[in-house]
Amino acid sequence: MDIKKYLHEKRDLVDTFLKEYYRNPHTPPVLQEAMGYSLFAGGKRVRPVLALAAYETCGGDPADIVPYASTLELIHTYSLIHDDLPSMDNDDLRRGKPTNHKVFGEAIAILAGDALLTDAFAILSDPSLSSRITPLRLLLALREVALASGLDGMVAGQVQDILSEKKEPDRETLHFIHTRKTGALLRASVRMGPILFGSDQEILDALSMYGEHVGLAFQVIDDILDIEGVTEELGKMVGGDEKIKKMTYPRLYGLHKSKEIAENLITNAHAALSLFSSEADTLRKIADYVLTRRS
C-alpha cells in the first residue's frame, strides 16, 4: 500500500464533505472567509484519516462516517487558530501562510475558531448524515470527542502548556501536556472508528492503546521538528518552542533520547495491533508515517 496515496484519497473525501457543508453559508462573509482560510489551508487531515482507517480496520466502509470523521478537522483547526493567538503562542505563520489573526484580526479569529468548534458538534449530533450509524453509537462518539477536546483533554493540555513556559521541565508535567494537548484528540480519532462500528471491548481497547501511543509520538516528533525541521516544509517558523521556553521532550531529554522515545512509542503502537492481521496494515503504515514525517 502507498500510504501517501491513501492519505491523499481520504483527505479528498474529507475536503469534499467540508466544502459541500459550507457551500451555502448564512453568516457574515468575513466569518465564513476566516473559517475557510484556516480550514482549507492544506492540512493533511491526520485525525479524520485515523478515524476512517480505524473504522475500516473494524470492517466498515470509510465512506459511511466521512461527515463524522470530518468534525475532528474542525476541532483541530479551531485549536490551531486559538493556539496561534498573541495571548498564547503568538505565531505569525501557519501552513506556510500568515496566521488567521494576522489576516482577520484577533476578534474574528477567535470567533472563527468558536464557530468551527460548535459546527463540529452540530455535525456529530446529526444522525441523518449516515444511515449506517445508529443514534446511540453517534452519541457515544460525540461524548468521546467532547471529552478529548475539553476539561480533561486538549484544553487542559493547552492551559498546562501555558503555565509551564519558562519553567524547568519535569517528566510528569511534560507527559500531562503532551497526552492531552495533542494526544487526546488523536486517541479519540482512533477510538471513533470502533465506537461508530460497534466493535467489542477487546477491539476498542487495542485500538485505544494504538491511538495513545501514536498520539504521544506525534507530539514528540513535533517537538523534534521544531528544532530540526525546515520552515518551508513545516509551514511555520522553527525554533518557536525554544524561544518561549516551552516544556518539550528535547528540552527535558535531549534530541537523541527524544528520538528513541518516539521510536519506542511507534513500536508499542504496532504491538497494540497484534490482535489484527492485514486489516490493520493501514494503521501500521500511518504509525510509521508519523515517525518519519517532516511536516
Image (cartoon, rainbow, N blue to C red):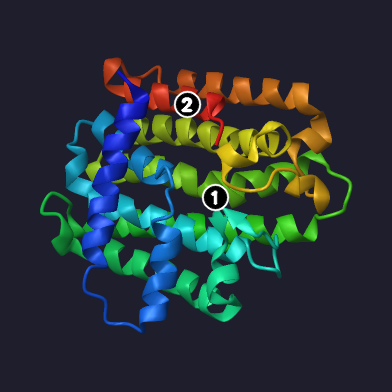
Asked if residue 108 shows in the view, the reply is yes
Residue occupying image coordinates x 36% and y 80%: 29
**In what quadrant of the picture does the C terminus appear?**
top right
> Which of pointers 2 and 1 indicates the residue nearer the eye?
1
Q: Which mark is residue 282?
A: none
> What crowding class fits label 2: few (fewer than 14 Cα within 10 Å), some (14-19), or many (20 or more)?
some
Structural distance between the alpha carbons of marks 2 and 1: 21 Å
Judge by depth and name the residue closer to the eye, 173 or 114.
Answer: 114
The amino acid marked with disc number 2 is Tyr
Q: Position of residue 3 (x, y in %)?
A: 35, 25
Which residue type carries mark 1? Gly
| Sequence-wise first label, 2 or 1 | 1
Measured from the top left, where is residue 254 in percent x and y? Answer: 81, 28
Identify the secondary structure beneath mark 1: loop
Residue 250 position (above or below residue 95):
above
Location of mark 2 (residue) = 289
* Residue 150 visible in this rendered orientation of the protein: no
Which residue corresponds to the image point at 28% horizontal and 49% vertical from the top-left?
Answer: 14
- Above or below for 190 versus 294: below
Give the side of residue 217 with respect to residue 208, left or right: right
Residue at left 23%, top 42%?
Answer: 197
Give the x, y percent position of residue 103: 55, 70
Q: Quadrant of residue 117?
A: bottom left
| Residue marked by disc 1 | 96
Outermost left residue? 131
Residue 123 picture location, percent across and down: 28, 64
Name the residue nearer the viewer: 91 or 245. Answer: 91
Question: For the residue carrying disc 1, how many other residues have a C-alpha within 10 Å: few (<14), some (14-19), or many (20+)?
Answer: some
